[in-house]
Image (cartoon, grey):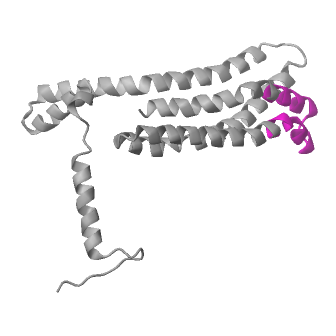
Amino acid sequence: MASKYSDINGNTQENFINNSETLVKSDKTSSIPDEQKSDFDIKFEEICSKWPNLVKYEKFKAFLLFSKEFCKQFLPVAFIFCIYIMINISNILFVSRDESPQGKNLLNGVGLGLSLYNMIAVTISLGIASALDTFCPHTFGARQYRLMGCYLNRCRFILTIVVIPVILLLFFIDYILIAINQDEQVAINAGKFCKGLLPGLIFFYYSDAQRRYIDLN
């Protein structure tokens, strides 16, 4: 008589074997139907099945095909990041053209305010929204599209809660800088710069989460 054992959850060996067989069957049936496959998916499967028999020229054509698909995926994301960085650079370029006696303090204030905004506001958004990079690919691969929407809405809800203390911190950032013996005029300019960015902060949070959701589909 075969011996039976139980794990910490009380599952017996027989239950474990049955669950394993169920997972194997579900894995076999979880492949994407042919009618839902893109042209690239079909070509990719065809190339993979013939790869050992391909000559160098055909392998080079496959490399070009993968490179084209890769560029289609990463270029829009790279373009968005370039736009975001150019906004920060343009702010500093415009302020640096001020040749008045207060121009130096204004430039220092904008530079300090931009650094604080990125450190306090942007990094929090990138950190929270990056959780979608882990959850969404798994659910998309399992074709659980409704669960992907649930993850997106939960991310938005968390960002909505987090943005409140972030706004309060940036709103009073000039007082905090003065309290740690920062130059008063530079602190005031940094506070004005941060306050000017606050109205669009929540929309930046939502757009970052939405961008990741779209990129992972």
**Residue lying at the far left of the rendered structure:** 53
The answer to which quarter of the image holds residue 23 is: bottom left
Count of labels shown? 0
Percent position of residue 174, x then y: 87, 35
Identify the residue at horizontal 23%, vertical 28% (top origin). Answer: 35
Q: Nearer the viewer, residue 43 or 190?
A: 43
Name the quarter where the C terminus is drawn: top left
Q: Is residue 181 left or right of residue 113?
A: right
Q: Is residue 46 left or right of residue 193?
A: left
8 in magenta: no
The answer to which quarter of the image holds residue 140 is: top left
Q: Nearer the viewer, residue 21 or 166?
A: 21
Identify the residue at horizontal 40%, vertical 43% (top origin). Answer: 139
Identify the residue at horizontal 76%, vertical 28% (top origin). Answer: 198
The answer to which quarter of the image holds residue 113 is: top right
Q: Which residues are magenta?
A: 169-194
183 in magenta: yes
The answer to whether residue 99 is visible is yes
Percent position of residue 202, x then y: 69, 31
Percent position of residue 215, x then y: 45, 30
Percent position of residue 86, x then y: 62, 20
